[in-house]
């Protein structure tokens, strides 16, 4: 490999790693902000019945999202067969 190509690859790898680091930092910041928001919401809703209802709704929402994803996969597969 030519020295110039090696330098370009090394530079690209360094830039890529820096981008990954920035992305990781953003994700950690967002996760921390979400945790703080959830904790404050839970502390505001001290009533255990409200918390159970919220947890149940979240559980059902996840099921719906998975079902929609499965349906999308089914139709994509069906369209590819046609």
Image (cartoon, helix red, strand yellow):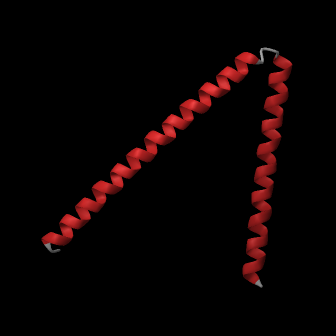
From the top left corner, tell me how far across and down residue 53 is, in percent. 85, 28
Q: Residue at x 86, y 20 (%)?
A: 49
Q: Residue at x 80, y 47 (%)?
A: 63
Left of 1 or right of it: where is 55? right
Q: Residue at x 38, y 51 (%)?
A: 19
Quadrant that contains the C terminus: bottom right
From the top left corner, tell me how far across and down residue 35 is, in percent. 60, 28
State which quadrant residue 30 falls in.
Answer: top right
From the top left corner, tell me how far across and down residue 67 is, in percent. 80, 55
Task: Give the mark count.
Answer: 0
Judge whether 75 appears above or below 34 on screen.
below
Left of 73 or right of it: where is 14? left
Q: Nearer the viewer, residue 25 or 81?
A: 25
Which residue of the protein is positioned furthest toward the top in this rendering?
Answer: 46
Left of 12 or right of it: where is 39? right
Judge whether 81 appears above or below 63 on screen.
below
Quadrant that contains the N terminus: bottom left
Q: Residue at x 60, y 25 (%)?
A: 36
State which quadrant residue 8 falls in.
Answer: bottom left
Which residue of the protein is positioned furthest toward the left in this rendering?
Answer: 3
State which quadrant residue 55 falls in.
Answer: top right
Judge whether 6 appears above or below 51 on screen.
below
């Amino acid at each position: 490999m030519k020295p110039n190509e090696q330098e370009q690859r090394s530079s690209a790898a360094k830039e890529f790693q820096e981008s990954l680091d920035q992305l990781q930092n953003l994700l950690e910041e967002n996760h921390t902000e979400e945790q703080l928001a959830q904790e404050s919401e839970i502390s505001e809703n001290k009533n255990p019945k409200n918390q159970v209802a919220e947890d149940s709704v979240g559980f059902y929402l996840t099921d719906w999202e998975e079902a929609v994803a499965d349906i999308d996969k089914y139709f994509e597969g069906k369209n590819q067969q046609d």
